[in-house]
Image: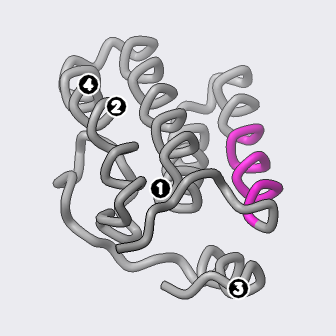
Amino acid sequence: MKFNTSLPKELKPYFDKELSAYHEGITNGNLTLAWNHLERAHIIGQRYPIAHTLIHWEMLKFGIKIKNGKEIIGQIPRLFIGGIKSFVGKIPVGNPGGANVPPLKPFPIENDILEIFSKAGISI
């Protein structure tokens, strides 16, 4: 069993870029675009406990901001369990992390994100 810890330096710029785009979308009131970047950050960081937990925290705050009860309730268990599953390497690859999708279901990964993983030497 492989224990994952922190986000590799090769992924950090891409993760940070998605988080920045998320915050910019929130600031500009473009909630759909903001959410898309948060999901992308989730896919990039979901293998690493700190990054994974941070994204679920941001998703919880987003749910509160838009007053979406389903997202708020759905993020609470993800916030506590997501990082643990990352640590032990048991994540549903490609899952975007929102409460609108099953938490354990894998999803296809967009080609540009697959390319990011490839450049970073991370196999999916």
Which amino acid type corresponds to the residue marked 3 in the rendered image? Gly
Q: Which residues are magenta?
A: 11-21
Badge 4 amino acid: Ile
Vertical placement of residue 62 versus 40, above or below:
above
Give the overall secondary structure of the magenta segment: helix
Of the two numbered discs 3 and 4 on the same chain, state the one appearing first in sequence.
Answer: 4
Q: Quadrant of the N terminus?
A: bottom left
Relative vertical location of residue 87 with respect to residue 56 in this rendering, above or below: below
Of the numbered discs 2 and 3, the one sitting upstream in the chain is 2
Element under disc 3: loop
Q: Which residue is mark 2?
A: 79
Residue drawn at point x = 65 percent, y = 78 percent: 117
Disc 4 element: helix
Residue on which the image places disc 3 = 121
Q: Which label number is shown at residue 76?
A: 4
Q: Residue drawn at (45%, 62%), measured in percent from left and top?
A: 3
Query: Please, what is the three-letter code of the amino acid marked with disc 2?
Result: Leu
61 or 48, nearer to the observer = 48
Identify the residue position indicated by label 1 in the image. Answer: 46
